[in-house]
Each structure stands twice: as C-alpha cells, then as structure tokens.
Amino acid sequence: MIPQMIVSRLKKPLYLAKWVAISLVIGACVGTACAAFLIALDLVTAFRDSHLWIVAFLPAVGFLVAGAYAAFGGRADGGNNLLIETIHEPAERVPRRMLPLIFLSSVACHLFGASVGREGAGLQIGGSIADRFARPFRLAGAERSYLLIAGVAAGFGSIFGTPIAGAVFALEFYLFGKISHVAIFPAFVSSISACYVAGLWGVAHARPTVPFVPEMGPMGLLCAAVAGIAFGLAARAFCALIERTGAAFNRLVSSSPLRAAAGGLAIALFVFATGSSRYIGLGTPLIGEAFAGTSLPWDFAAKTATTVVSLASGLKGGEVTPLFVIGSTLGNALSGVLPLPPALLAAMGFVAVFAAASNTPLASVILGFEVFGAGPSVYVAVACVVAFIVSGHSTIYRAQRADLGSVAPYL
C-alpha cells in the first residue's frame, strides 16, 4: 500500500499540471477573442471618426441593442455583476449567449458613438469562455470560481496589455478586502498567456510616457496625496452619478429599449450641438492630450457626463477606459494648482480614479507600474491609496462584496 504522504506529494504536481493546462487553454482562447474585439474596435472607431454623421443613428442602435438583451439576453444582461455573483455562488453557469451579445453590442455602440469602454466586454468574454471548460475539466464549487477568476484575469490582461495587473485585478474585483491565494496561480498563468496570444495576433497597446519625475520629497508626496483626494472624490462622484442617473432613467422610462434610445439621443444631440467627437467612444486621444499638457480643464467633467449617460441608459461597454480618461484629464487640470508636471499628474489620475471606482488598489498600482514603468511608481501608489480611502465603498460593480472585518475602517 502506498503511504499517504507519498500520495499527497504526488497529487500536488498533478493538480498544478491540471491548472497549467486549463489556464493555458483559457489564455489562448480569451486572448484570441479579445484580440478580435480590439481589432474590431479600432476599425469601427476609425470609421466613426471619419463619418461623424453616423452618430445620428445611436438612438436606433441603442433601442436595438437593449431590445436584443430584453428578448434574448436573460441572465447575460447582468454583465460583470453576473460574473461576480457566479464567482461567489458558482451554481448556475454563465450563459453562452453572453459572449456574442457583449461582443456585438459593444462594437455597435462604439461604432455609433456611445461613450463607453472595453473592459466590460473583455471581462465578459473571458468569463464566458472560461466557464465553457467547467464540464470538460469536471470543475465545480470553489474550483469553478477559480476558473472564472482565471477568465476575468485573461480578459482584463489582454484588453489592456497588462498581464500582472490583469491577474491581480481578477483577484480583487469580486471581493473588496480579501484575496484568494489559491486562485493566484490560474489567474497569473491565464492572464500572461492571454496577453502573449493577443500579441501574436498583432494587438499593440499605446503606452503614455512620463518624461520627467521630480525627486521624491515631502512636498511632492503631499501634492500626490492632495491629488489623490481629488481623484477619490471624482471616482465617488462617478459611481454616485451612474447609480442616480440609472435610477432616474428607470423611473422616467419603463422600457429598457426606450431608455437606451433616450441615452443615445442625448449623446447624439450633444455631439451635433458641440460639433465635436472628443467625448464619445473610448476617448483615448484625450489621454494623449493630458500627458502632453494640452487637454482642456473641463474635459474630465464632459467625459464623465457622456459616460454616465451612456452606461446609465443601457448602452453597452465598459467603465474602465473612460475612467482612465477622466483621471488623466483631471490630473492635467490639477497641474494648474499643484507644482507637479502635467504628465505625472495625468499618470497618477489615470490609475487612481480607476483604483477608487473599482476598489482594486493593488491592481491599480501594478497597472501604473506596467504602463508607466518604475519612475513615477511612488507618486502613483500614493495617489491610488489615498483615492481608494477617500472613495469609501463606492464601486462601479454593484455585486462586489466586502470582507467587512478587513475594510470596516474604510467604509
């Protein structure tokens, strides 16, 4: 009879080998799907920017997208919140229809000018694909939760080209204040492999640069903390506006297709009234302006408004890239009152508003390191931590839970 100790030691490498195989397969599939999504976004964004008249059709597209979800979406309409709920209680499967619905609806909303991001699609693509492997690999209970976490990590990592931040984000976003150390391994393997595969498909990610970082000192760190307060308040306002505007849309318009049409109409009227497409779509050109020190003082407020209306009315996409835009443009605006370089403040805002709005401070600090390098890392970390504390329990993820014993001082 084989001694129990030997059996136990044999099981560990077999268990790790199983999760290596699962995670690599998830990474390859999610990386490929997210690469296709990013390529599609680039194509429709280029077309929209050269044919701005197409925004006039956003109300109709909003009606059709929301109508499709009402008719065929079922539980898939829960989006990222459904993924969080399933990670916590892995009883029901993530609907197969989630992937095609979020892929097509997000691309359509971007094509016609909604102010939305891409992370929502990335997470749902990742979670939907990952859950397809639960039965073949006979995963249930906690292991199925790890599977979904791996899918989310792969989706976030490949969408933004940040494999480490993708893994840590997946470990933080569903539970505020506690990290599952058992899920670390599949999260990292999936995220890294998804980023690698997306790169093989030719996906490249723009990286803003911070050309000058002042030497650390009490005044610089104090300024970083003051900026962090502003970023935390901006994140708190964004979350509150999403909730209250969504409630107002629900109260005034009972039909979800009509709500999305109303939101699309508001965005279209705004675009044609201003004659500008600055605040629709991803808004990434605004990030470049913020790092160059040329963005306008009100850019962060305008991008907040168009994003809140788009998402609260039911147009499909994510929140994260708009939060990057809001944070970086707010950082540039703060350069008028804080004695730090505009690009450094833009970098701090880029990650700190996201950290505060998503309750993922560790992932955000790592994101800053992966995007901007080590130079501004201390300033970025200070801004992220302060913004996270200031924001309290505000969150863009309604289903996100809190480990009250760990985070009670911040609530």
Image (cartoon, grey):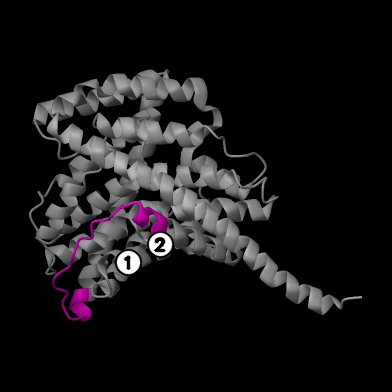
Circle on res. 163 = 2
Closer to the camera in the image, 153 or 85: 153
Residue 397, visible in the rendered structure: no
**What segment is highlighted magenta in the picture?**
195-220
First reached walking from the N terminus: tag 2 or tag 1: 2
Is residue 159 found inside the magenta-colored segment of the image?
no
Label 2: which secondary element: helix
Q: Amino acid at mark 1?
A: Glu
Q: Quadrant of residue 165?
A: bottom left
Residue topped by disc 1: 370
* Quadrant that contains the N terminus: bottom right
Circle on res. 181 = none
Mark 2 and mark 1 residues within 8 Å of each other at the beta carbon? yes
Residue 56, visible in the rendered structure: yes
Label 1: which secondary element: helix
**Cα distance between the residues tagged 2 and 1:** 9 Å
Residue 205: percent from left, percent from top: 27, 56
Residue 174: percent from left, percent from top: 51, 52
Is residue 196 found inside the magenta-colored segment of the image?
yes
Closer to the camera in the image, 23 or 80: 23
In the image, taking residue 1 as reference, residue 316 lies left or right, namely: left
In the image, taking residue 22 as reference, residue 232 lies left or right, namely: left
- Main SS type for the magenta part? loop
